Amino acid sequence: MKLRRTKLYLPGNNPNMLLRGHLFGPDGVILDLEDAVAMSEKDAARILVRDVLTRGDFGDCEVTVRINAMDTDLWRTDIETVVPCGIDGIRIPKVENPKDVALMGEALSEIESKAGIPVGKTLIFCLLETALGIWRSYEIATASKRVAAICPGGEDLRADLKTTRSENSEELIGPRRIVVLAAHAAGVDALDTVYADITNDAGLRRETEWVKQLGFQGKSVIHPNQIPIIHDVFTPTAKEIEQAKRIVEAAAEAAAKGLGAVQVDGRMVDRPVVKRAEFTLQRAGLKSGGEK
């Protein structure tokens, strides 16, 4: 299971951040060619990102590039420039139509084939930043086998909903629930939007705890200082890990004896509880049996 607790945005026109962003320890980085780059700098940023991808070392980070939207004339040049560098995936902004995702999959296959990259290697991450995109989230998530995650928008989505940011983002409760349901139904990750107030650690922790409870697997990040807090929330505690180990081990023993359910700590454990325990161990970097 690929950990995607944090995906750090790095402006595509900032060479210092592009080269150093992975050192802050996110699970992934997003080299941004869209919102972070003014229209007059698009070409220069694309070349810079290509050069960094060619020469840079991102360690264990999952490397993705946010391209320009598919309703522009920029996206094909974006993918033709960055995909041959062997990136892990692309992030498509403002996705509304499943047909666009399918079209992107075909375009990626063509580029990979020409570049000698295994066809299918480049994953797709879909940003759902409009009401229509949210409404079609399941169809979008299943439009290509390349789709690894779907992500609700923040400010763009609020604008499309004709609302504003509230203290606890009540206006995004419905969209977030829809995205989680669609993602799990489609078998892809649900990754939450950014938390914009980079000075409010308590607010970030509160929101991260809430979206984790909803069923999200991680959040996008706009400042390195947010990474430790989000990782702390999404990483199981020692107590949770030990309990999960007991459940998985007890279930394995019961299965060996031909038993269905088993008791752990005085409570009956059935298959759904075992699945949650296995997920906890995977989150902790352990296999279901408890070994590294």
Image (tube, rainbow, N blue to C red):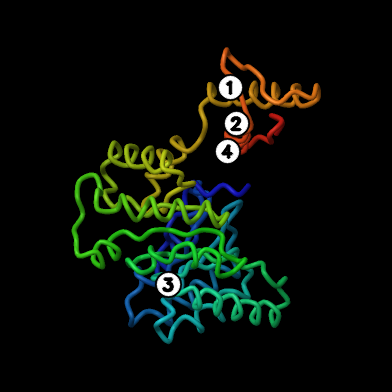
Residue 277 location, x and y as percent?
60, 31
Q: Nearer the viewer, residue 258 or 289?
A: 258
Spatial CA distance of label 4 from label 1 is: 14 Å
Ranked by sequence position, the earlier of labels 2 and 4 is 2
Image point (42%, 87%), residue name:
73
Q: Residues within 10 Å of mark 1 (few under 14, many from 20)?
A: some
- Mark closer to the observer (1, 3): 1
- Mark closer to the observer (2, 4): 2
Q: Residues within 10 Å of mark 4 (few under 14, many from 20)?
A: some
Please give the label number shown on residue 33.
Answer: 3
291 left or right of 181?
right
- Location of mark 2 (residue): 277
- Location of mark 1 (residue): 243
Spatial CA distance of label 2 from label 1 is: 8 Å
- Location of mark 4 (residue): 283
Does dot 1 land on a helix, a strand or a loop?
helix
Spatial CA distance of label 3 from label 2 is: 39 Å
Image point (48%, 62%), residue name:
138
**Given contact means CB atoms under 8 Å apart, are the residues at marks 4 and 1 in contact?**
no
Residue 148 falls in image quadrant? bottom right
Does dot 3 land on a helix, a strand or a loop?
loop
Residue 106 location, x and y as percent?
61, 79
**Badge 1 amino acid:** Gln
Spatial CA distance of label 3 from label 4 is: 31 Å
- Mark closer to the observer (3, 2): 2
**Badge 3 amino acid:** Leu
**Given contact means CB atoms under 8 Å apart, are the residues at marks 2 and 1 in contact?**
yes
Q: Is residue 211 above or below residue 9?
A: above
Please give the label number shown on residue 114.
Answer: none
**Badge 4 amino acid:** Arg
Q: Nearer the viewer, residue 55 or 283?
A: 283
Q: How many marks?
A: 4
